[in-house]
Image (cartoon, rainbow, N blue to C red):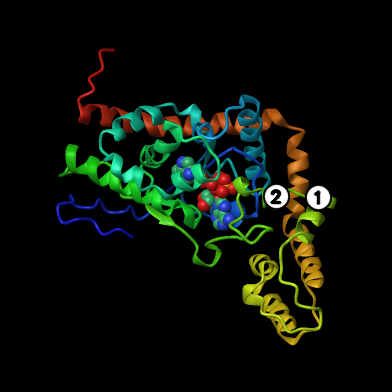
Amino acid sequence: MEPPDSTSPPTPQAPDDPVVVSGIQPSGRLHLGNYFGAIRQHIELHKQHDAFYFIANYHAMTSVDDPDRIREHALDVALDYLALGFDPEEAALFLQSDVPEVTELTWIFFNHLPTSRLQKGVAYKEKVDAGLTPNAGLFNYPVLQAADILIYGGSRVPVGSDQKQNIEIARDIARRFNKTYCPDDPLFPIPEPHILDDVAVVPGVDGRKMSKSYDNTIGIFDDGDELQEKVMSIVTDSDPLDAPKDPETCNVFALIDLFADEEKTKEIAQKYREGGYGYGHAKQELLGLIEEHFAEARDKREELKQRPDYVRDVLREGAKRARKRVEPMMERVRELTGLVRTH
Ligand code: ADP
Ligand code: TRP
């Protein structure tokens, strides 16, 4: 973590009970990388703390300009969360665009971040290298993300490790804002990323980071032939069946490790090392584990799919909760920054 510089104002105490904030882009179907990197933690944390989770449709616009896709994927993400165990009684799940104040706060934040900070953005460079248009939205993406977090007073942000730099930028903006406008009574807590080391990067079927942009994903709700085909296509080396194998360098094993309990993982690692256990066997094992892990969620998703009105109600109620939180925060921001209101 970046150390605060010596001129930084006092860091506001992280509240004893953290406010958890995270978002997920509706830019495609959710995959195992999203699940282990972020969603599983979202589901776990929302039962323990105050939590705000939004479907980041403003962010998705930086890479998708098809309105139908943005709309459909947004509802799909909501369905996925509910099927995976999100309980709307416990926390807020909503569309980012239902709280348009985040765009207002983004504008305010633009004035407190040197462009050089964004020019060093690794995610921006990676996305442009992967073929996305280098538009201003993509470039300024981390500033909107900072507004997303800080507008709810977010202090803990469960994300995958690739988001670390974006959270650093949010921390930087929070410090700069506090220092400029309210050094004695800082408004924004400095958010902490919540990243699980053991799932830092989930590999895709080609061995690179699993990502929608690389077309190498296994979807959380893939099933039947599609799931089987994807699992069977995971890249391995070409060691023959009899040869002893190193589980630590195998993509199939890396995925098994995420699903299986400790005992099972050990047992399979031993089979790898002994030889006589082929990658085909490992893939069958993985297939079974995936099917079992998501069986209940899959049934629930089918059931929820028949109730689109319920899903919309959940998002509407979530937005209400979020807006209630945002109003006093934005009033304070406007007051501090001199944006007087005439009505
Ligand atoms: P994608 O790369 O497929 O576009 P996103 O950027 O929408 O995925 O990521 C949504 C969340 O899932 C983020 O918190 C991100 O860190 C996490 N995530 C995505 N891919 C992976 C992965 N392969 N391993 C671990 N976490 C991941
Ligand atoms: N950038 C995140 C991703 O690609 C999505 C996101 C948008 C987010 N706003 C956020 C994550 C705020 C955490 C907090 O996955």
Q: Nearer the viewer, residue 266 or 126?
A: 126
Which residue is situated farthest in the right direction here? 225
Q: What secondary structure is found at the residue carrying circle 1?
A: helix
Q: Is the N terminus in the top left, top right, bottom left or bottom right quadrant?
A: bottom left
Which labelled disc corresponds to residue 87?
A: none
> Does residue 38 show up?
no
**Residue drawn 30% across the image and 35% down it:** 109
The residue drawn where x is 33% and y is 29% is 107
In the rendered structure, the answer to whether residue 273 lies left or right of residue 10 reads: right
Position in image of residue 335 (x %, y %)? 22, 27
Horizontal side of residue 299 vs 256, given as left or right: right
Query: Circle 2 sits in a helix, a strand or a loop, which is it?
Result: loop
Q: Nearer the viewer, residue 83 or 272?
A: 272
Question: What's the CA distance linking mark 1 and mark 2?
Answer: 9 Å
Q: Is residue 246 above or below residue 202?
A: below
Which amino acid, by three-letter code, is at mark 1?
Glu
Disc 2 crowd rating (10 Å Cα; few below 14, some 14-19, many 20+) is some
Q: Are marks 1 and 2 in contact (CB under 8 Å)?
A: yes
Q: Is residue 13 left or right of residue 158?
A: left
Which residue is painted at 81% across and 66% down in the image?
Answer: 284
When the figure is inspected, residue 59 is found, relative to residue 8, above or below; the finding is above
x, y percentage for residue 247?
66, 77
Residue that label 1 marks: 226
Residue at the image point whose x is 62% and y is 27% from the top: 66
Residue, disc 2: 219
Give how far across and how far down residue 298 sits, in percent.
76, 48
Q: Is mark 2 within 8 Å of ligand 1?
A: no
Task: Locate the C terminus and report the quarter of the image it occupies.
Answer: top left
**Foreground residue, 169 or 333?**
169
